[in-house]
Image (spheres, rainbow, N blue to C red):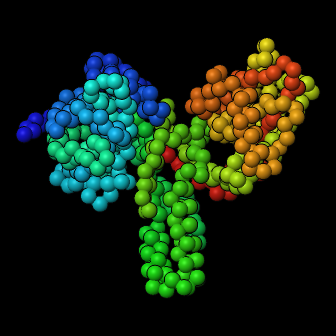
Amino acid sequence: MFAVAASLVLIMFIGLSINPALAESIPVLNQLSNSLKKIYWFNDNYITYADKMNLVQDKKGIKIELEGVVYDESSLKFIYTLTSSEKLQWGVQLKDVSLRINGKNILADSQYSRVISDETKLSQDSDKNDKYAVITTYDVSDLKFDNNVPIDWNIGSIHLWGDRYAKGNWDFKFKASKAALQANIKVVDANKVIRDIDGYKAYIGKIIFTPTEIKITTSIDKKLSQDLAKADDAYEKDKSNSKLQEKAEHLRNIQTELMVCLGSEVITDEKGNELRSSTGKGDNNRGIELYHPLKEIPNKLIFTHLDYSKISDGYGNDDFGIYTVTPLKQIKTPLEFVQGDNMSIVINSIENNNGKLKVNATFRGDYAAGRITQLPILVLPEKTKVPSNKAEVEKMYKLINSTYDTNKTDIGDYYKAANTNNNTFDFYYNIESNEDYSLWLRKIPAGYYDKDKQLVIDIK
């Protein structure tokens, strides 16, 4: 019988700088920090702002050690290890979970839109036990916590293998007490329409800035789901009516477009820093998108719609016809190439070192981070032609992969670092000495960054 109650007193944030001292001083948290930061969207922030819990539940051959909890008025994060005496088929899969805050189960009617979880495996395949480090995050941005609010996190069952589950009620009870967080947490009730399709709207709800993440909540007109349900019912009663079928499909397509609206937006602050997505969760009416924290709370967030049809070849791939191709031997550096409206690439230098080609380039103007991820500079044999069918497109990608030196060119790192001020990077390519090559520079078609659909939200 679990009879431990712990008091969770959250740390006062001092500025927005990261202080790793806490994680280093608590051995288990330090272990989790080193493991979890290998997952690309997690970092030491989560561990730094956690308060040590040291609550343990050991049942049915599965031990859960709740090491830390973070509450930032946006999310409630449980940081824990799970050790199983039996190998787990799909990692940590929790089921029959309840999260009671002040006696109310907040998962009762919206479990799938509230929870985001990820893990890293600590054990080796040869080890007797499976052990995982996990962060499970619950959205509590729409809740108001009082001081010393009681929290009860109960896990009813955990998947083992096939259709077998371990059932045991791993139950963690504690109280959360809010610290002085207001100087470092900003909640903006935006309530802005970000997309309107045939009168059905998608909204930006809240924008929440914390030292560990940026959260944006979205919602869709409830009238859309109601109209879709009516259209489906009408079609079920008259399956021969093609107009009813078309109406239901049309509404379903609108719902899909509105649900993914943030995925087709680039979000920047007033300095050109781009929000880097962590992950997201949602249902038909409500969504939660998480982003890496910025170094400071911005004055504005600018949402710019991306029209992917402008860069598609019709097969769902990049349109290589939008590149400008110039033989390397004809290029004199520095060379400025205009990509689009207020966007250019400056080729500062090209160096060939025994088949290792280095191109130093500066991305001037808007959306530098996003442009770097779009294969902006290719070095390909002069005989390479723009592909004209799907098979040729696939060959093109194989050729690009063989030429691009990904061991030295880490686009992910460039994306994290790039903004309007930090915009110069080296790109590396593998070339053959007996082959002539061309430089392919990617144009940005007019309207791809659709500023006519731009939404600016004042933060400060």
Instruction: Name the outermost residue toward the right.
Output: 330
Q: Check the picture and name the quadrant holding the N terminus.
A: top left
Judged left or right of residue 276, residue 86 is: left
Q: How many numbered discs sit on the rendered protein?
A: 0
* Residue 21 image-quadrant placement: top left
Judged left or right of residue 157, residue 313 is: right
Judged left or right of residue 450, residue 180 is: left
Residue 357 visible here: yes
Residue at horizontal 84 percent and vertical 30 percent from the top? 381
Q: Is residue 303 above or below residue 25?
A: below
Judged left or right of residue 397, residue 92 is: left
Closer-to-camera residue (120/350): 120
Q: Is residue 227 above or below residue 149?
A: below
Residue at horizontal 81 percent and vertical 35 percent from the top? 440
Please provide percent x and percent y for residue 47.
Answer: 34, 28
Residue at horizontal 88 percent and vertical 34 percent from the top? 383
Please provide percent x and percent y for residue 347.
Answer: 80, 27
Residue 9 visible here: no
Closer-to-camera residue (223/406): 406
Instruction: Name the outermost residue toward the top.
Output: 354
Residue at horizontal 51 percent and vertical 41 percent from the top? 277
Please provide percent x and percent y for residue 355.
Answer: 78, 17
Please provide percent x and percent y for residue 325.
Answer: 86, 37
